[in-house]
Image: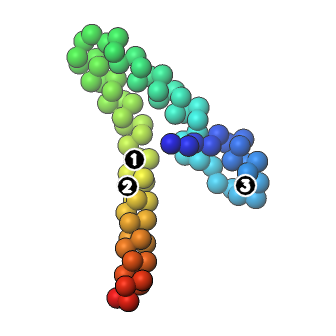
Amino acid sequence: MFILNERLTRQIFPENKYTAPITIDVFSKWKERAQTFASLENKLTLFITFKKLEDEFEAIEHRIYDVADELDSAIQLAIDIARGK
């Protein structure tokens, strides 16, 4: 997965007012927190820690599913058009 940091996004798209919902810094922090899971011996503590992290990226997960559905629909439409449907 490629995630642009905010500075790089502004360099590539200077006129664009878009701000990425996830930056490389956020992704790095999630990864660091996930790496601590192996050291948690208490299963309840592990579950709670995982759940807190999972809650943070659940919204973006749903957005990815929505975009994937839209892309799938667009591809199917193009196929249908090419077949003369």
Residue for point 39% across, 30% down: 53
In the image, farthest residue toward the front? 83
Under tag 3, what secondary structure?
loop
Residue for point 64% across, 54% down: 18
The three-letter amino acid code for the residue at tag 1 is Glu
Under tag 2, what secondary structure?
helix
Residue for point 31% across, 12% down: 40
Residue 43: image quadrant is: top left
Residue 71 place in picture, x, y as percent: 43, 65
In the image, farthest residue toward the left? 43
Q: Which residue is mark 1?
A: 61
Residue 80 place in picture, x, y as percent: 37, 81
Q: Nearer the viewer, residue 81 or 3?
A: 81
Q: Earlier in the sequence, mark 2 or mark 3?
A: 3
Q: Is residue 5 above or below residue 46?
A: below
Q: Is residue 6 left or right of residue 38?
A: right
The three-letter amino acid code for the residue at tag 3 is Phe
In contact (CB < 8 Å): disc 1 and disc 3: no
Q: CA distance from mark 2 to mark 3?
A: 25 Å
Q: Is residue 27 left or right of residue 73?
A: right
In contact (CB < 8 Å): disc 2 and disc 1: yes
**Residue 13 bears which disc, if any?**
3
**Residue 65 bears which disc, if any?**
2
